[in-house]
Amino acid sequence: MLSFNASEGGLNSFMLRMVEDIMGGKPLGELEIDEHAAEAGIVTRLEAFVDTIKGFARSATQHKVPAEDIYRGVPTVIKSSKTFLLVNMSAHVDLIGAAMEAYGIRALVLPEPNERDLLYANQVTSGVECLPYRVTLGSFLRFYHDNGNDMKKFEAFMAGAYGPCRLGHYAGEQIRIFKNLGIDLPMRTSVSNNAYQDMDLGSPFRRRAFMSLTWNGCIAADCLFKLLWRTRPYEKQAGSTDILFEDYIRRIADRMRRKEAFNDLLRQATSDFKSLIDPEIPRKPLVGINGEIFLRSNKFSNNNLVKVCEDAGLEVVVSPMGEWMKYILY
């Protein structure tokens, strides 16, 4: 089989891995072509591929691939005695984890991604997969190595969605890599086509209550982020805004675990953040950041772009998580 792709075809990066498994060791040629590709180089590679096919035919090698090596199904989240590992995309995940714990699901938010995550992932991927896929994969691999390779008490959790990029393929491809590496880490997913209501929480009422709590937590994090971005460029004392933000995330998470309302905390946060502003500092140019949800939300993946803009004399606002949730649900 011969596959022609545009250079850096991220969308094909998942499909080609599936094709590799289906081919089961048979010759598979991949040609990535862009406007700079020379005809002579393409012909040379095609001739080499033909030689590979002839050599394979002469060897009369037959290799049957077991069905489980091709299958990409991932079970949805069910109630489990194990702890679900959540990739730390942003502070929103702390509140999502708190909502899960409120309804009896054990959850552990992984540390913020760093260079080690990307290093682990780059060793087992082709390099054309999107950055969010590699960062999330690397977070699981980093936890595996840091935890002494003992995954008996854990299951990985990776959300899925229909429509945006290849997010729906993350879980299936990541568990394939776990298997290839000999890592016994089950993977669970939850998908957007049923509004992420596939968790086994008992009655429909409990599922709706859980989704309501999760949504309210995401909106609360959106509000706190807006307060953070509005305050930090004008703070009287450097670092005070970040400390207050983290404190309110913890306080709201504690309320959510107890299924308690937290509107009063948000009202209090408004005045607390305002008190940190130096009124003598003039307003700065306001810029908006939009784009792929993981990149715009994860500080490591975007090289802390918001803070870089603030240090350059700007005030920044980033599209909220709520915008993305509404997109995938409709």
Image (cartoon, rainbow, N blue to C red):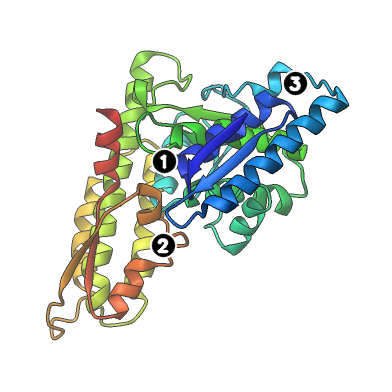
Residue at horizontal 31 percent and vertical 79 percent from the top: 311
- Residue 30 lies, in percent from the top left, at 60, 40
Q: What kind of element bears circle 3?
A: loop
Q: Earlier in the sequence, mark 1 or mark 3?
A: 3
Judge whether 256 appears above or below 23 on screen: below
Q: Quadrant of residue 218?
A: top left
Residue at horizontal 45 percent and vertical 29 percent from the top: 103
Query: Mark 3 packing: few (<14 Cα in 10 Å), some, or many (20+)?
Result: few
Q: Earlier in the sequence, mark 1 or mark 2?
A: 1
Q: Quadrant of residue 210?
A: top left
Judge whether 218 appears above or below 247 on screen: above
Q: Which mark is residue 65?
A: 3
Query: Mark 1 packing: few (<14 Cα in 10 Å), some, or many (20+)?
Result: many
Measured in 3D between alpha carbons, the distance from the residue under mark 1 to the one under mark 3, in whole angstroms, is 39 Å
Q: Nearer the viewer, residue 9 or 317?
A: 9
Q: Which residue is mark 2?
A: 302
Measured in 3D between alpha carbons, the distance from the residue under mark 1 to the one under mark 2, in whole angstroms, is 22 Å
- Residue 166 lies, in percent from the top left, at 44, 36
- Type of residue at label 3? Val
The answer to whether residue 299 of the structure is visible from this angle is: yes
- The answer to whether mark 2 and mark 3 are in CB contact below 8 A is no
Q: What kind of element bears circle 2?
A: loop
Q: Earlier in the sequence, mark 2 or mark 3?
A: 3
Q: Nearer the viewer, residue 56 or 283?
A: 56
Location of the N terminus (image quadrant)? top right
Residue at horizontal 35 percent and vertical 74 percent from the top: 308
For marks 2 and 3, give the one nearer the viewer: 3
- Type of residue at label 2? Asn
Q: Which mark is residue 96?
A: 1
